[in-house]
Image: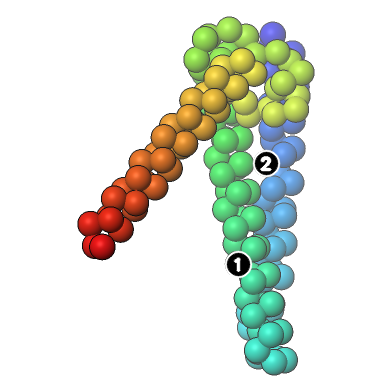
Amino acid sequence: MVEKQDEMKALLLKSKDEILAGINKAIKSGSETATSEPTGDIYDQASSERDRELGLLLNDRERDKLRQIDEALLRIAEGEYGICEECEEEIPLGRLKVMPFARFCVRCQSDMEKLQAQTRRVEEEREYREISFGEEEEG
């Protein structure tokens, strides 16, 4: 068990370093383009703005991944790593190698995703009905 945690800790730290290097590179390249004068026509500027927004979105995803990695490192330090937070069973090593910051086993993760999909569908149906009723009242 200790060997598995050491291996996973090394994998998590490597991933963290790679993400931080990627974010730093993106920030440097973004600051270089931001300081230059706008060039080209309106379409070129719109394309540059879209690329910048996409970069920010990707950075948000990377920051979220960093948060998950830090939480996994904390679980290792507390001796709770590799245990499903739902059923408290051991998460298989194969899953941890693919997703080293996993908090749930495959079965529990699948169950949670199904529940989230059902909840989202109910909420969307409720919103649709509210829109339909609102239009009938006006007419």
Q: Most extreme residue toward the front, as rendered?
A: 139
Q: In this view, does 136 lie above or below 77?
A: below
**Residue 16: which numbered mark, if any?**
2
Which three-letter amino acid code belongs to the residue tagged 1? Glu
Q: Is residue 26 above or below residue 18?
A: below
Residue at position x 65%, y 89% from top? 42
Q: Where is residue 135 in the image (x, y as percent from the top left)?
A: 30, 58
From the top left corner, tell me how far across and down residue 53 is, in percent.
60, 67
Q: Is mark 1 on a helix, strand or loop?
A: helix
Q: What element carries label 2?
A: helix
Q: Residue at x 59, y 28 (%)?
A: 73
Q: How far apart are marks 2 and 1 (CA)?
A: 23 Å
Which residue: 51% across, 17% down?
85
Judge from the rendering whether residue 21 lies leftward or rightward of residue 135; answer left or right: right
Number of numbered markers: 2
Q: Which of 70 and 136 is in front in this view?
A: 136
**Which residue lies under the disc numbered 1?**
53
Q: State the quadrant of the N terminus.
A: top right
Q: Quadrant of the C terminus?
A: bottom left
Can see residue 34?
Answer: yes
The crowding category of the residue bearing disc 1, from other C-alpha atoms within 10 Å (few below 14, some 14 to 19, many at least 20), is: few
Q: What amino acid type should be assigned to the residue bearing mark 2?
A: Lys
Q: In this view, does 32 lie above or below 86?
A: below
Q: Nearer the viewer, residue 65 or 104?
A: 104
Q: Quadrant of residue 45?
A: bottom right
Pointer 2 or 1: first along the chain: 2
Residue 23: x %, y % from top left: 67, 56
Q: According to the image, what is the colour scheme of the structure?
A: rainbow
Nearer the camera: disc 2 or disc 1: 1
Q: Is residue 117 above or below residue 51?
A: above
